[in-house]
Image: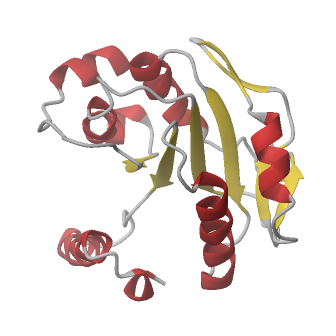
């Protein structure tokens, strides 16, 4: 299914280095075709490390959880965690912690927002090291803390990609969802982070 989505995705040639992409994390039958357009941009790119930032849908915790395990497993194989990078990132703020919160299944169910990105990455990039991040709360202070920490870690780093796993709006009536999503997309294009918070 992932391969078929990637084959069908047509994207413009991007000249220059891609630093980050945004991709939806609904089930593949709902958003796989859209996600494939983001990942198709990476076809001729090479990254040693991928930082995937995802929300926690089922478990609330007051920090950013950087996975403290060794790897994430998918049907396509294991993706090793860049434990050295993860440990350095967690040392930059008490709001960022090495943890399994948000990464391992709860009694209700397992989180999906991060793991659905991995088969796409495995197909387009092959080998890479993963920095899996799940946000237990999403507010301006936490988001800014993570953004500043990543900026410090990635200053002049050309081998790292950031993947933002998102939902946009899917509980609103179609017209309202379209309006909200367009506002969000325009704010991203303008780097207007204040209107996103």
Residue nearer the viewer, 157 or 62? 157
Residue at point 21% right, 18% down?
A: 7
Residue drawn at the location 39% of the way across and 33% of the way down: 28
The answer to whether residue 91 is left or right of residue 150 is right
Is residue 77 shown above or below 188? above
* On-image quarter of the N terminus: top left
Q: Position of residue 73 (x, y in %)?
A: 69, 21
Left or right of residue 9, residue 71 in this image: right
Q: Find residue 11 and report its image quarter.
A: top left
147 and 11: which is toward the camera: 147
Asked where in the image residue 57 lies, by quadrant, the reply is bottom right
**Residue 178 visible at all:** yes
From this view, report whether residue 86 is shown above or below residue 151.
above
Q: Looking at the picture, does residue 181 appear above or below residue 162?
A: below
Residue at 83%, 27% (x, y): give it.
Answer: 70
On the picture, is 61 further left or further right than 139?
A: right
Residue at the farthest front position: 156
Tally of marks: 0
Return the x and y of residue 10 as percentages of the image width and height.
12, 31
Q: Position of residue 64 (x, y in %)?
A: 75, 63
State whether residue 101 appears in this view.
no
At 44% from the left and 38% from the top, the residue drawn is 27
Image coords of residue 143 (percent x, y): 62, 73
Relative depth, front residue between 28 and 160: 160
Residue 125 found in image quarter: top left
Colour scheme of the picture: secondary structure
Q: Is residue 84 left or right of residue 144?
A: right
């Amino acid at each position: 299914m992932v391969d078929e989505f990637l084959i069908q995705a047509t994207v413009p040639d991007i000249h220059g280095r891609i630093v980050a992409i945004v991709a939806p994390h609904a089930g593949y039958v709902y958003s796989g075709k859209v996600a494939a357009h983001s990942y198709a941009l990476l076809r001729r790119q090479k990254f040693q490390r991928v930082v995937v930032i995802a929300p926690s849908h089922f478990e609330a915790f007051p920090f950013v959880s950087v996975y403290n395990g060794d790897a994430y497993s998918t049907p396509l194989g294991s993706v090793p965690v860049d434990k050295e990078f993860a440990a350095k990132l967690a040392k930059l703020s008490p709001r960022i912690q090495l943890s399994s919160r948000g990464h391992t299944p709860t009694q209700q169910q397992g989180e999906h927002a991060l793991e659905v990105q991995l088969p796409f990455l495995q197909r387009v990039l092959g080998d890479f090291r993963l920095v899996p991040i799940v946000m237990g709360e999403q507010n301006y202070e936490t988001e800014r803390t993570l953004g500043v920490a990543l900026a410090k870690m990635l200053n002049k780093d050309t081998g790292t990609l950031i993947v933002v796993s998102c939902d946009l709006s899917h509980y609103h009536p179609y017209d309202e969802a379209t309006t909200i999503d367009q506002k969000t997309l325009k704010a991203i294009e303008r780097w207007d982070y204040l209107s996103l918070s």
